[in-house]
């Protein structure tokens, strides 16, 4: 089985938003917020919808950073990862049952949390390509 998801590398003030899963088999592990791409929508539409539903926030600008392919024991994951900003004064908040903690992580803090395996690959890459992915966006 294959699952296609869209994830946001949401950045603000030199930090990236990480979310800790509240339930399910992988509860307690950290992820980039986002979710499944549903029939009839593209990855950006899915990202905007998921962030609105799960974090109550609106996405501003976003651009594709990378696509991660990862094989979990029970499914194959394709994760489109977008660098994005929040629209206006939009502020993410954890929704009960989805995430139990949100954290803004600086570059040197990215590997301080226990990421989901697919997200760990991306977090490691971001530590090396931070300036290219996020630094230019902060100007």
Image (cartoon, rainbow, N blue to C red):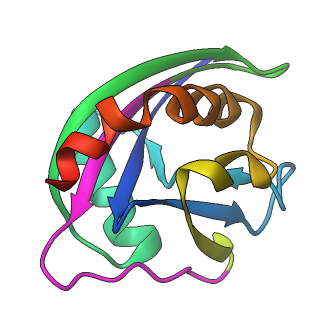
Q: Is residue 30 magenta?
A: no
Question: Where 94 sits versus 126, above or below?
Answer: below
Q: Is residue 17 rendered to the left or right of residue 138?
A: right
User: Dividing the picture into quarters, in which one does residue 11 lie?
Assistant: bottom left
Picture residue at 61% right of the left edge, 63% below the top? 19
Q: Is residue 94 magenta?
A: yes
Question: Where 43 sits versus 29, above or below?
Answer: above
Picture residue at 56% right of the left edge, 80% below the top? 95
Picture residue at 67% right of the left edge, 29% below the top? 118
Q: Is residue 32 rendered to the left or right of residue 108?
A: left
Q: Nearer the viewer, residue 42 or 31?
A: 31
Residue 41 in view, yes or no? no
- Image position, residue 126 (x, y; %): 51, 33
Picture residue at 50% right of the left edge, 55% below the top? 33
Q: Is residue 49 rendered to the left or right of residue 33?
A: left
- Image position, residue 15 (x, y; %): 45, 61
Q: Nearer the viewer, residue 119 or 132?
A: 132
Image label count:
0
Question: Where 127 sits versus 87, above or below?
Answer: above
Region in magenta: 79-96
């Amino acid at each position: 089985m294959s699952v296609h998801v869209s994830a946001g590398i949401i950045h603000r003030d030199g930090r990236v938003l990480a979310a800790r899963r509240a339930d399910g088999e992988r509860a307690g592990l950290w992820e980039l917020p986002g979710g499944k791409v549903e029939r009839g929508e593209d990855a950006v539409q899915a990202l905007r919808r998921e962030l609105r539903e799960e974090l109550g926030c609106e996405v501003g600008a976003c651009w594709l950073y990378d696509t991660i392919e990862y094989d979990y024991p029970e499914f194959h994951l394709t994760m489109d990862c977008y660098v994005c900003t929040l629209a206006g004064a939009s502020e993410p908040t954890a929704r009960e049952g989805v995430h139990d903690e949100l954290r803004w992580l600086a570059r040197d803090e990215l590997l301080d949390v226990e990421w989901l395996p697919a997200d760990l690959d991306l977090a490691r890459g971001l530590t090396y390509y931070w300036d290219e992915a996020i630094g230019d966006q902060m100007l």
